Image (tube, rainbow, N blue to C red):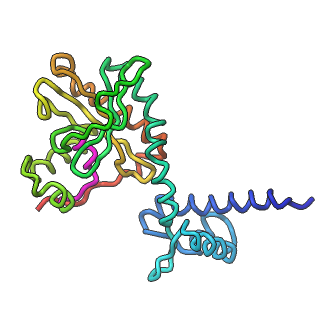
Amino acid sequence: MTDTPSASRGHGLRRDIDLLEALASDEAQRAGGLGVVRLAQLVGREKTQISRALKVLAAEGIVERDPDTLEYRLGWRLFSLVARTSESRLVRVAEPVMHALSADLEETSHLCVLSDRKVLTLLSVSGHSFRVHGWEGRGVPAWQTSAGRVLLADATPDELYVRFGTAGEMPVPDLWSLIQDARRQGYARVSEEFEAGLVGVSAPVRDFRGRVVAALNVSAPKSRLGDRLDEAGRITARAAARVSTMLGWEPRRTPVARARLT
């Protein structure tokens, strides 16, 4: 019995997905790409088949070939497709986790992203069945908030100087130190730095590449949350890790900061 055209296309798609999985592997990420021979070994196919498939994928921008090493890596078009769907998926995935988080802490939680020098709230929910809209769409200075400090976890010192060097509100070395503290703890905390009487904790949400794409934040009056900030930070970090896992993140792929402030 021969394969139908649709079945053949399905087999071809599965083989292409195997190639993309190989190019997304830890080995490929560490090496910056993989050659045809190694890819053939990983997916168990002939080199000529791999070469033909990669040429088709490269022509569509799904993979790209380094002109110097001749190795392949995931391409611009694939990341473009992911970027165009990531924000809506992020909100959809995060919302039920946020409801559980808010119910656990009996406080409102927020899903935040970085927009230039500000933190923008995409979604706010309480522990009840309704959303809380007061913060959605509102931007606040990144350097004053716990969310900003975890959202900047991947930034280099040079990037911080470019973004905040002329702001004047907080010296970049001080901001860098706070960001590194948050990286080590797994969450950031602030107490009345943004607003008198207000405290908060935030933890990073990572995508499948290990990059910080959002922050889960819990903010409340100091009278209610001030004595349990570290407990709230740990709980929020676990919630953020759950969202990250649903976005494809694996802990071993988390990047390690190598840059130092000079």
Image quadrant holding the N terminus, namely bottom right
Q: Is residue 5 above or below residue 253?
A: below
The mark tally for this picture is 0
Horizontally, is 210 left or right of 54 in the view?
left
Residue 144 lies, in percent from the top left, at 15, 40
Whether 205 is among the magenta residues is no
Magenta-tinted stretch: 148-157
Q: Residue at x 47, y 42 (%)?
A: 88
Q: Quadrant of residue 182?
A: top left
Q: Quadrant of residue 102?
A: top left
65 vs 253, left or right, is right
Work out which residue is located at the far right of the displayed protein and give it: 1
Q: Nearer the viewer, residue 76 or 41?
A: 76
Residue placed most toward the observer, 126 or 181: 126
Extreme residue in the bottom direction: 68
Where is residue 229 drawn, in percent x and y?
21, 26
Residue 260, position as x, y percentages in the image: 17, 59
* Point 46% across, 28% down: residue: 96
Residue 221 x %, y %:
18, 21
Q: Quadrant of the C terminus?
A: bottom left
The residue positioned 68% from the left and 77% from the top of the image is 48
Q: Is residue 86 above or below residue 40?
A: above
Look at the image and say whether residue 152 sits in the magenta stretch. yes
Please state which of residues 148 and 260 is positioned toward the viewer in this rendering.
Answer: 148
> Who's the residue at 44% across and 37% down the image?
91
